[in-house]
Image (cartoon, rainbow, N blue to C red):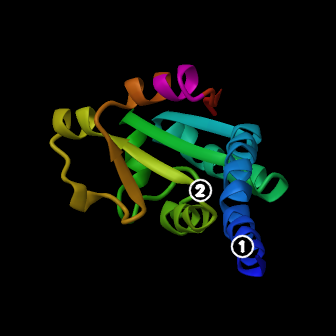
């Protein structure tokens, strides 16, 4: 009889973590959905890039758990070139991008722009990721994933 009680207790003990995990999954999903999510749209590196990087840095300083994706297309991809600098201040973008990447910010380059402008991936900083279409990516982030939209 005692062995039956021991088996019962052992069964409850072993099942408890599975129940806890099942209960934790919705809480984790809810926490992710409560997290701020922002897409920054860059289509003019000369006019937007430095301002965007400063805005993103400020946002991460105040709300470090924010999920930020920067999508660049057209002339906006130029700030993601290896060695690129702001034309007005001569500030190099690479270190700013690297610092934000460490904080979880994602930088995506439009592959349609790359093809149209005949740009290879070797031109871009190593922190760059790629998306088939910048415009499609932005629209899906807004409509499907409920990202806030910012165009600096």
| Residue shown at 37% from the left, 52% from the top | 129
Pick the quarter of the image with the C terminus.
Answer: top right
Numbered disc total: 2
Q: Which mark is residue 88?
A: none
| Residue shown at 54% from the left, 37% from the top | 47
User: Residue 44's spot in the image, x, y percent?
Assistant: 46, 34
Q: Is residue 107 magenta?
A: no
| Residue shown at 74% from the left, 70% from the top | 13
| Residue shown at 36% from the left, 44% from the top | 109
Residue 64 falls in image quadrant:
bottom right
Q: Residues within 10 Å of mark 2 (few under 14, many from 20)?
A: few
C-beta proximity under 8 Å, tags 1 and 2? no
Q: Nearer the viewer, residue 49 or 102?
A: 102
Which sits earlier in the primary sequence, circle 1 or circle 2? 1
Name the side, left or right, on which 100 lies relative to 3.
left
Is residue 24 shown above or below 125?
above
Residue 31 falls in image quadrant:
top right
Nearer to us of marks 1 and 2 is 1
Q: Nearer the viewer, residue 65 or 150?
A: 65
Q: Is residue 143 magenta?
A: yes
Mark 2 lies on residue = 89
Q: Residues within 10 Å of mark 1 (few under 14, many from 20)?
A: few
Region rendered in magenta: 140-145
Q: CA distance from mark 1 to mark 2?
A: 77 Å
User: Residue 145's spot in the image, x, y percent?
Assistant: 57, 29
Is residue 149 shown above or below 99?
above
Q: Main secondary structure of the magenta part?
A: helix
Name the side, left or right, on which 52 lies relative to 125.
right
Where disc 2 sits, the SS reads loop
Q: Which mark is residue 4?
A: 1
User: Residue 126's spot in the image, x, y percent?
Assistant: 36, 66
Is residue 145 shown above or below 99?
above
């Amino acid at each position: 009889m005692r062995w039956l009680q021991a088996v019962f207790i052992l069964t409850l003990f072993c099942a408890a973590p599975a129940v806890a995990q099942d209960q934790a999954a919705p809480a984790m999903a809810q926490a992710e959905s409560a997290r701020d999510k922002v897409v920054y749209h860059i289509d003019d590196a000369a006019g937007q890039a430095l301002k965007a990087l400063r805005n993103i840095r400020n946002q991460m300083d105040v709300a470090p758990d924010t999920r930020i994706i920067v999508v660049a297309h057209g002339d906006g991809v130029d700030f993601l070139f290896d060695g690129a600098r702001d034309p007005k201040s001569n500030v190099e973008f690479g270190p700013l991008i690297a610092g934000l990447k460490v904080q979880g910010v994602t930088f995506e380059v439009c592959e349609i722009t790359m093809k149209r402008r005949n740009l290879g991936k070797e031109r871009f900083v190593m922190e760059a990721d790629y998306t088939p279409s910048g415009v499609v990516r932005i629209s899906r982030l807004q409509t499907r994933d409920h990202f806030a939209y910012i165009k600096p």
